Image (spheres, rainbow, N blue to C red):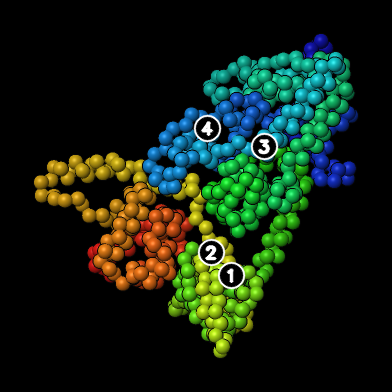
Amino acid sequence: MSSDQPRVVESRPSALTSNPAHEAEDERDHGTAERPLLGDQVRDIVRLIQCRKCARPLQEPVTLPCGRSLCKRCLPETHAREYISYPATPNRLQGFECPYQECGRNHAVGDCGVDVILTKAVNNFKAEMEKARETVTTAEVSTHVIIQRPNDGQAGANVEGQTTSRVVKGGPLAAVYTLADSGELGYDSKVTFAEVSSFGDEAAAIDNKTVFKVKESVRTEMDCQVCYALFYDPLTTVCGHTFCRSCLHRVLDHSSYCPICRRGLSVSPLLYRESCPSNEYLKTIIETFWADAVLTRGDALAAEALNRHREFDIPIFVCTLSFPMMPTFLHVFEPRYRLMIRRALEGDRTFGMVLPQRPRTANDTHFVEYGTLLRIVNAEYFADGRSLIETTGVSRFRIIRHGILDGYLVGKIERLDDISIAEEEDLEANETQQALERFESAATHQSEDSTTSGPPMTTSEDLAKMPTSELLSLGVSFVERMRQQSVPWLAQRMLTIYGECPNDPALFPWWFASILPAKEDEKYKLLETRSVRERLKICCGWILEWESNSW
């Protein structure tokens, strides 16, 4: 290399080292005047706010259900969603294919709101960068930026042809941000720098001060509004608000509404990472700037979880089969259960209900694995200590481990919730998208068969192909026919207890199982399911057996 050529400052990927002795909450040492930022560090900092689609700084960022974000203007065109009949609310009728190939799902428009926290963080980031650019405008500092775009992978591709260079006003950080802001720096492009001015120390000082200001400004938006600490495993809801995953998990134990805007949340309260991924942009920002604080919070949460697992959650009544949102009436007379109910009334008025079973081996339990959490609504005591208890089902659970306390069962349980609305829609679409073609084929065959008369009877195989709304209609119409026949299990006394036949697909299976005179082993199958559609198919299966006189 000749002496008149600009000197290229090589950079290597490196972790951003911590300096906890000088900064209370894992403030990162991104360089000093004596040790300037490395090229990869500069590039990674700017990439934190670049849209993966347009490569410019994010503008009104929208975080998708898959956890990835992009500018609102970069969203694909929407289309009418097909093969979905539940819940079919207005904000879920339109959707679009996820622009990220690694996802590939169809997202409902109603699930894609502007990300409130990411918007504020990006705006703060850009405001500090604009101040830095104003500062370097008065200083005689420029940077020669060499941009290397990723190879397109074609055989014989000219790597040199993927490289361009620009001389930009300011130090390396301001220069790279300027290129990103103008759309000249692709999201996956790499950069190296060549000095073209003699103000390297001044540029390094400006960059380091800018990074400090960026971190300080962005940090003001990085507190969870439930625990008021730095986000840990940030999860953004469909309304655009972000919480720690563990905090949102606790919220959903008591309410299905966003703690900030009170919008209903159509996610599984278990918040599995497969169906409810973390917010990628926020997680990367936090782990880049405050990695030590993230590790500390993770250790604290792990210790808290370990402490919880050492104790049993709840008393469990081994008696009958109960269902969520349905009433259960109990006559409590055994001393051990009288004690259990008294303690429940003194506490949060909840206890678990499970069905007894006959153990088949010495290692089997005398109760089933899945049950329903009940809340006491009313209690009436008799003079001899007996009581009549009215309860209502709250949620389902699975017993993880169990023990005995004062003669009654206590258990460590995990809550069992349904899959999210988006997964429910995917399930219906996957099962019914070929139903139309099959129906048309069967109709053609039927028209050619002169011996066929009348519509074909519904079979168990047909249930898997029916839209969720039709499964509900099948159940509701069966109840209406039975009511016209004045069957005993639809007498007014039963309807007074359990209510009229609901038209809500989520509620109908629980109501139907509570009122239908079927075997408890059959009804128990509902407690194990995690989908409204699956429960409706089970109920419709009972109807087919009833009408075929199998019961």
Q: Which residue is mark 3?
A: 118
Q: Which residue is mark 1?
A: 350
Q: Position of residue 522 (x, y in %)?
A: 38, 68
Of pointers 1 and 4, the one earlier in the residue sequence: 4
Left or right: residue 173 versus residue 96 is: right
Q: Which mark is residue 394?
A: 2
Q: Please tell me which residue is depicted at 67% across the width and 19% down the height of the picture.
A: 182
Q: Quadrant of residue 358?
A: bottom left
Q: Position of residue 486 (x, y in %)?
A: 27, 68
The answer to whether the residues at label 1 and label 2 have Cβ atoms under 8 Å apart is yes
Of pointers 1 and 2, the one earlier in the residue sequence: 1
Q: Please tell me which residue is depicted at 42% across the width and 35% down the height of the picture.
A: 80
Q: Which residue is mark 4?
A: 99
Disc 2 residue type (three-letter): Val
Of pointers 2 and 4, the one earlier in the residue sequence: 4
Number of the front mark, 2 or 4: 2
Secondary structure state at the residue bearing disc 2: strand
